[in-house]
Image (cartoon, rainbow, N blue to C red):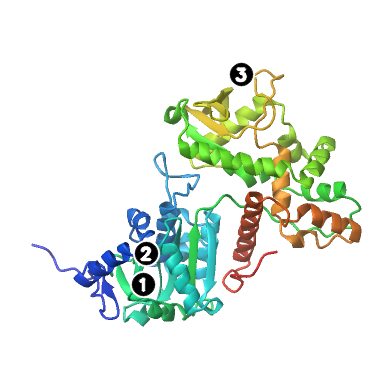
Amino acid sequence: MKMAMAGLYKRVLPSPPAVDFASSDGKQLFIEAIQNGTMEGFYRLISYFQTQSEPAYCGLASLSMVLNALAIDPGRKWKGPWRWFDESMLDCCEPLEKVKEKGISFGKLVCLAYCAGAKVEAFHSNQKTLDDFRNFVVRCSTSDDCHMISSYHRATFKQTGTGHFSPIGGYHAGRDMALILDVARFKYPPHWVPLTLLWEAMDNVDEATGQLRGFMLISRPHRDPGLLYTLSEDLKDVHKVLSAVFSSLPSNFGEFIKWIAEVRRREDGGQNLSQEEKGRLALKEEVLKQVQETGLFKHVASFLSSVNSCCRNILALSHENNLPDIAAGVCCQGAELLAGKFGSSESYCCRETCVTTLKANGDKPITLVSGTVVNGSSEQGVDVLVPSGPKKLNCCGSSATCCIGMYPAGNDVLTALLLALPPETWSGIKDEKLLHEINSLVSTKNLPTLLQEEVLHLRRQLHLLKKCQENKVDEDLGAPLC
């Protein structure tokens, strides 16, 4: 015999205005929407549909669901050996304990999406019209490469509760209805709502921020975030500008492009490359090639060739030909990533390394750095796949005379960093001729499309992270970037 317990088991979905997804009417809407091609985003979302694990985790659950649907690799472990987005991993913009108590704002959820490596377009309801919103819903519903998260007030649908986040799973054009995949599945099932009513529910002020609610479109990105500096010195030439920036770099600035490497346990891969691995490496190699073709790269390379010992953190990265150190460092970092402890104080030591190339079925050679990494009493075989540079690769083992054309070198890292810094970084330069030269070197206008997208995405991440730290991300959302 069950004992009576205080608590709630679900709620009755107010209908109208909502239509239960599993009802006869809901099923008919679903079938018709499929036939009209406006449920393409649904399949990936439903494959990763989850229930929020805390009453205030609706934003985190919606985002982790979308990130997994887009197959974005978090680059760190969830549990066991698995890399997987979970609410517990979305903590870069707001402490989880605070989110658990009060939820998360719209702007900080956007910041989290950027931190996780997604490409984001976000709008408060006063920044777009109902027709704009409808067009965005159609765009995501007719494609599986972007997904939408809506921030709305439940009271508009006669539901209990206040502000809520959930992904939009599809659209029925004939009846102008959107499918809400409610992540509070313990409360309400997925349901269809009139799009005009959803817009009204978003056109509602969040009392915590004083800002209107809204919606965000999330798609698969290219890359990761970096660092932020502002110069305010009387500098005379490009060499001195570079010296001023680089001398103030933190010791861990190499993390700026840690996305370059593909890390795997040796037993997981062998000598075979998946199509996904090949595709990602080819994309990264092309971005780095475009970095090397910029005018800025030549200045950075010249500077690094003459850098003195006062810039030790730059020297450590600019020593491109010290193969044993490079290979050992790469493998140790790979082991840290696999353990979910990148940048930790734990001691990792690479006992042996080997650098070879992989080439199969006429594909372009891929650099494979293999090592046995020891941490205390445990050891792990690590393979790191790295895009190859223009140098000829002909080495394996620990010979100090070996030469490797392996990305990323210091020149690549630092050039990418400079390009990603916001324009105001250079505004303090007093010499007008020098300012014009620097602005020309770091301008994104004439960059190839792939590199331009990379730089602007990184810049947007930096901007939002800074606003997060200042607690101004909600009021500044949607501000244009130069």
Q: Are marks 2 and 3 in contact (CB under 8 Å)?
A: no
- Amino acid carrying mark 1 in the image: Ala
Give coordinates of residue 190: x percent, y percent. Answer: 30, 67
Mark-to-mark CA distance, 3 and 1: 62 Å
Judging by the rendered image, the residue that carries numbered circle 2 is 38
Q: Earlier in the sequence, mark 2 or mark 3?
A: 2
* Residue 64 visible to an observer of this rendering: yes
As displayed, is residue 201 above or below residue 111? below
Residue occupying the far left of the picture: 1
The reply to whether discs 1 and 2 touch (Cβ–Cβ < 8 Å) is yes
> Which numbered marker is on residue 173?
1
Residue 281, x across and y down, in percent = 56, 38
Closest to the observer, 435 or 32: 32
Which amino acid does the dot numbered 2 rest on? Thr
> Is 149 located above or below residue 282 in the figure?
below
Cα–Cα gap, marks 1 and 2: 8 Å
> Tag 3's secondary structure?
loop
Q: CA distance from mark 2 to mark 3?
A: 55 Å
